Image (spheres, grey):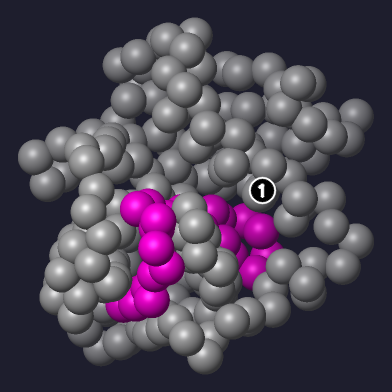
């Protein structure tokens, strides 16, 4: 069952130049018989208000990215993997995505990754009826963008966004569809300067 959630970013006024917005969607396929981790990754870019695929692949890796092998889906390789990794912005997003995922998968105590943090000065709210997820960021000077990691508590699903923090406080700044499958999730928001925060949501 597909669920569509609107993601709203609200911030204190800070200016930001043009920035590409990406969505990385991951599904953990489990470990191989040799202990290697298998992750299906969809990479999309926001264009004209809609997300468009730029690459799909299956990643097999050990404890770190240096061990990763990539099997690209030739039906969805609008850009080659080599070209993607030559783009510093995309490579940085990929590194954040994979490092976050591998840390969760390898954790002996997953509860520390699922604990809510720093909720007093920031807000993550889910309206199940309207299917709207609201993220309010009280930024600090220098905050221009943030990562939004939405990871299921069982590690099976992971959706990551890079979002700009734009000017005009208390105004709706950006909306995009978030594709989440039924599960319990931890939503972690990491501004480029300010303190990260997180909260739990459930999609059913």
Pinpoint residue 62: horizontal percent, then vertical percent: 82, 30
Answer above or below: position of 94 versus 103: above
As for residue 156 lying within the magenta part, the answer is yes
Answer above or below: position of 171 versus 126: above
Q: Which residues are magenta?
A: 133-159
Pinpoint residue 119: horizontal percent, then vertical percent: 53, 86
Does the image show residue 88?
Answer: yes
Q: Decide: few, some or many residues near mark 1? Use Cα within 10 Å; few <14, some 14-19, many ≥20.
A: many
Seen from the viewer's position, the closer of residues 154 and 111 is 111
Is 100 positioned to the left or the right of 12 in the image? right
Does the image show residue 6?
Answer: no
| Callout 1: SS | helix
Answer above or below: position of 165 versus 32: below
Seen from the viewer's position, the closer of residues 44 and 163 is 163
Quadrant in which the N terminus appears: bottom left
Pinpoint residue 78: horizontal percent, then vertical percent: 30, 16
Is 31 positioned to the left or the right of 83 in the image? right
State the residue lying farthest toward the left. Answer: 48
Answer above or below: position of 62 versus 184: above
Residue visible at 68% across and 65% down? 154
Residue visible at 35% across and 53% down? 144
Count of numbered circles on the image: 1
Residue visible at 59% across and 82% down? 118
Is 54 positioned to the left or the right of 73 in the image? left
Is 98 positioned to the left or the right of 11 in the image? right
Residue visible at 61% across and 18% down? 70
Quarter assignment of residue 110: bottom right
Quadrant in which the C terminus appears: bottom left
Pinpoint residue 102: horizontal percent, then vertical percent: 73, 45
As for residue 202 lying within the magenta part, the answer is no
Residue carrying label 1: 101
């Amino acid at each position: 069952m597909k669920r569509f959630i609107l993601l709203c970013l609200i911030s204190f006024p800070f200016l930001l130049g043009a920035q590409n917005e990406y969505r990385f969607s991951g599904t953990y396929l489990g470990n191989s018989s040799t202990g290697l981790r298998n992750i299906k990754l969809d990479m999309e870019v926001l264009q004209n208000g809609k997300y468009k695929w730029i690459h799909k692949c299956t990643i097999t890796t050990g404890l770190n990215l240096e061990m990763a092998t990539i099997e690209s889906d030739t039906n969805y390789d609008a850009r080659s993997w080599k070209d993607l990794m030559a783009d510093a912005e995309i490579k940085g997003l990929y590194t954040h995505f994979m490092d976050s995922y591998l840390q969760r998968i390898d954790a002996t105590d997953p509860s520390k990754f699922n604990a809510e943090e720093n909720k007093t000065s920031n807000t993550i709210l889910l309206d199940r009826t309207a299917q709207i997820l609201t993220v309010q960021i009280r930024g600090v000077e220098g905050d221009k963008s943030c990562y939004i990691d939405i990871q299921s508590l069982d590690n099976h699903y992971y959706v990551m966004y890079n979002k700009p923090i734009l000017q005009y406080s208390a105004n709706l700044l950006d909306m995009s569809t978030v594709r989440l499958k039924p599960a319990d999730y931890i939503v972690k928001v990491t501004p480029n300067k300010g303190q990260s925060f997180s909260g739990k949501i459930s999609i059913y």
